[in-house]
Image (cartoon, rainbow, N blue to C red):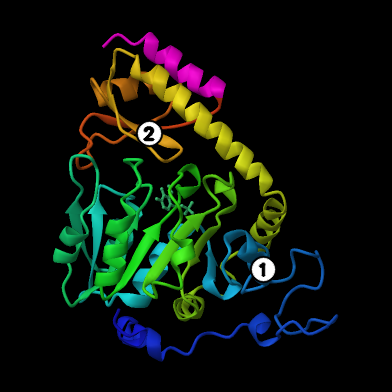
Amino acid sequence: MKDLKELIRPNIRALKPYSSARDEYNGAEASVFLDANENPYNAPNNRYPDPMQRELKNLLAPIKKVKPENIFLGNGSDEAIDLVYRAFCCPGADNVVAIDPTYGMYQVCAEVNDVEYRKVLLDENFQLSADKLLAATDEHTKLVFICSPNNPTGNSFCRAEIEKLLTSFQGLVIVDEAYSDFSDAPSFLSDLDAYPNLIVLQTFSKAWGCAAIRLGMAFASKEIIEVFSKIKYPYNVNLLTQKEATAMLRRHYEVDRWVKSLMEERSRLIDEFMALPCCEKIYPTDANFFLTKVTDAKAIYDYLVSRGIIVRNRTTVALCRDCLRITVGTRPENDALLDALRNYVG
Ligand code: PMP
């Protein structure tokens, strides 16, 4: 890996960050707060939240088996995706490389930040090749995006290929593990010390059942986390989110129960879906959704909408012609889908 200083945009390296009132006061005992121009009435919502989310990070660290200094928390993992561009990619000069198809926000953020986005097509089994990704890089490539399990294909990638990328690429490798709780493949979190160029993304939006509170996590070296903290909005995770997440972490055993039952329901749904006349193929999945090739994705999508059932039509996505992406719901929700499709006349 190149020296991190070389990877950071020069203006970000030189930036003197905004120092908020609550940054400067470092948590010593105090009872009178006249520092932040807040309203003294309407507690607790009158006070700015902890800009560094210390309590939350201290609870999360042992669960994820990392140190608090290796954690960045943001407004969904979408915030972390945007921050990696803003921290490392010079608009109009640098580029990033990503697998194709994958999660759409990597490209949207590239375009917002005026950064060239280079796509490398997966093979027909939706597997990636580290060599092909490396071949697409040049001296201006700052980031490579991998999503494992991948959205929308659902599969995890071969670990050795990702390791090859981490060892050979001179920039940063982002491994988005939004769906890893639904997979038996081990997370890359335990490899943070081995790979200084690794950034792992996870989220409270999927297995944790908290999409509404908007809380995403990035895990990386202390030096990379410091760059994120320097450029984020001062109070990027609001108090209500911090409180709700803290409560959720205290009952994290519930997440294991949800994941177990969703994985059981996933295999039942797939078995029954495969028997439908409109189903041509179901791709292997490690996520809480599956990708299926159907007889006519647009017609089936429209038919399901008319029955009040919404799935995701992925037919225009690379390698996904006539494919629908279907999230695993509760048993009654999945039965409603199956019943509707049994009555579909193509
Ligand atoms: N990464 C992937 C692969 C996703 O599919 C999603 C959301 N669908 C996200 C990140 C964004 O998640 P968040 O809700 O944490 O912003």
Figure quadrant of residue 60: bottom right
Can you see residue 172? yes
List x then y, in percent, for residue 76: 50, 57
Mark carried by residue 58: 1
For disc 2, the marked residue is 290
Residue 62 sits inside the magenta stretch: no
Most distant residue in the right direction? 31
Residue 277, given in percent of the width and then of the height, sits at 29, 12
Give amino acid for label 1: Asn
Which of the pair 143/189 is nearer the observer?
189
The residue closer to the viewer here, 167 or 225, is 167
Residue 306 visible in the snapshot: no
Type of amino acid under label 2: Phe
Are the residues at dot 2 and dot 1 in contact (C-beta closer than 8 Å)? no
In the image, the segment drawn in magenta is 331-346
Residue 2 placement, left or right of 45: left
Q: Quadrant of the C terminus?
A: top left
Tell me: 103 left or right of 33.
left
Q: Residue furthest left?
A: 135
Can you give x and y, in whole percent of width and height, for residue 26 in the image? 70, 85
